[in-house]
Image: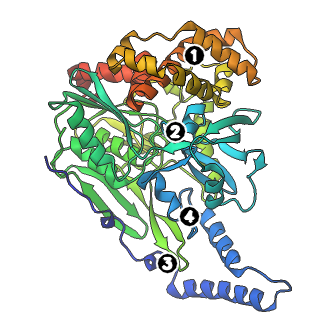
Amino acid sequence: MRWKAIRPSKLLVLPFLWLSFQLSAQEVWTQMYKLGQTLSYINDYYLDTVNVSKLVEDVVKRTILELDPHSSYISAKEVKSVSEPLDGNFEGIGIEFNVMRDTLVVVAPVAGGPSESVGICAADRIVAVNDSLIAGVGLTNERVFSLLRGPKGTKVSLLVVRKGVLEPLHFEVTRDKIPINSIDAVYQAKPDVAYLRITRFSLTTMTEFIDAISETFTRKPKGVILDLRGNPGGYMNTALLVAEQFLEKGKLLVYTEGANMPRYEESASGYGFFIQTPVVVLIDEGSASASEILAGALQDWDRAIIIGRRSFGKGLVQQAFPLSDGAQIRLTVARYHTPTGRVIQMPYKQGDQEGYYRTVIDRYVRGETFSQDSIRLIDSLSFQTLVNKRKVYGGGGIMPDIFVPLDTTYYSSYWSKMVRMGIVTEFMNRYIDEVRTSLSSQYKQFGDFKNDYVLPNEVIGEMVEYALEKGLHSDESALQISLPLIRVQLKALIARTLFDSSAYIQIFNEWNDPAYQKALEVIEEWGKFEKEILRK
């Protein structure tokens, strides 16, 4: 089996000065000279001592903020740190974030990380850390790292503002080692059906993909479920390597184009391992960027059935340009287009980053995550797929072929508070320490644990008592609403400790995940769904 290697340098290798051609060269130098004059006058004549370097940095930051939501400035000290979630590991709370107008905005919690476990969500704003206000002038990536990273096992208290929630939310997060693995679950969902959950596209994803399939299956699976829910993206070239495993040689995967960037295309090599294998892709509002490009390529070629909810809608290409002091600006230079020509980038107003990140919350408020009829589709942004001429839409994310609403049947404010306060994590860590030896000897195989283990009733009672000791008063009616979810959550936490993260996800998927259940149905009846959806 041969795997195609795409060199990152192939994309977007044009000189920085090309960008200045929108103005005349003379006009650019005139404006640069004007700024230089201003700084020189300040340095030579201003009443007090001024840090000119900081003034320049502030000007650059402010300029970048007036562009699109994904262009950014990264100081020299921060350049290495911002790549760690994709290239290395670290100890901290496990979030991907942006500092937006001096406010820390969560882009996505790292799957399986401490923040996800207590319920921190994309678009949350962290305004205080350990009772110290951090929202305000001067907040930098470097300061965020210093506040949120720390040794495994240490705790940090967060105050979070969430759109649609009147009062700020308090979270207690226990720092942990943030995993570098980008595939955190792989197993046989049914005999010869592969399930893979890809949480991000990192440098190791393709190796993980190959190893996961070869270790789990002795022969090629008859169906594949790619779970990209909550996947915020990562390295685009890695996502394309995964996409081409399902497409014939020469099939266009993606193309990029910008006002000053010529069209550039990437196509499948033809060495894919699953070119004829039925495939389902799961997406939701947390799927963004590279994960949307992958889903869009397979949808445009009528190659996969997409299940779930509308994805985020990030389709802008950033290129890093070095500055003289070691800092970088990551400038948006082009748009990604799916093979049909769709632009998946959601609309935005230049300089309005707050409104941009509020869009996903607004979708939730107007009911889009619960009702397909609430999704606003624009006929002028419709396209036809390349094989069967089905209608698909651009203009803001990937629309699923089969919509599955968000299920909140078992949610309650009582259970949500217990999770946010870190009570569940603390209690279960203590409980698992007490029973680990006996459970490990009783359940040697995950399958036996999944099928036979039943959480003792007294464990839930003890957790409620522990919550009371921590200041959370019990709520019997809310407890009964969430009881089925609580039971499976605690069982899944035990499974993760005894086995691995794949065991945790498998328990949740098989308990009550309608999108996952629909994916299994589609794979098992592929001929029927292929005719009804892909060939209609």
Left or right position of 170 against 273: right
| Amino acid type at image mark 3 | Ser
User: Disc number at residue 250?
Assistant: none
Q: CA distance from mark 2 to mark 3?
A: 42 Å
Q: Residues within 10 Å of mark 2 (few under 14, many from 20)?
A: many
Disc 3 crowd rating (10 Å Cα; few below 14, some 14-19, many 20+) is: few
CA gap between label 2 and label 4 equals: 22 Å
Q: What residue does disc 2 label?
A: 113
**Could you say where residue 46 lies in the image, as x and y percent from the top left?**
82, 87
Circle 3 residue: 20
Q: Is residue 208 above or below residue 169?
A: below
- Residue at horizontal 60%, vertical 32%? 118
| First along the sequence among labels 3 and 1 | 3
Q: Which of marks 4 and 1 precedes in the sequence?
A: 4
Percent coordinates x, y for residue 490 in the rendering: 52, 20
User: What residue does disc 1 label?
Assistant: 410
Quick one: SS at disc 3? Answer: helix
Name the residue nearer the viewer: 102 or 369.
102
Whole-number angstrom distance, CA of label 3 to CA of label 1: 55 Å
What's the amino acid at mark 1?
A: Tyr
Left or right relative to 3: residue 532: right
Left or right, 194 with respect to 34, comes to left
Q: Which residue is mark 4?
A: 78
Quarter containing the C terminus: top left
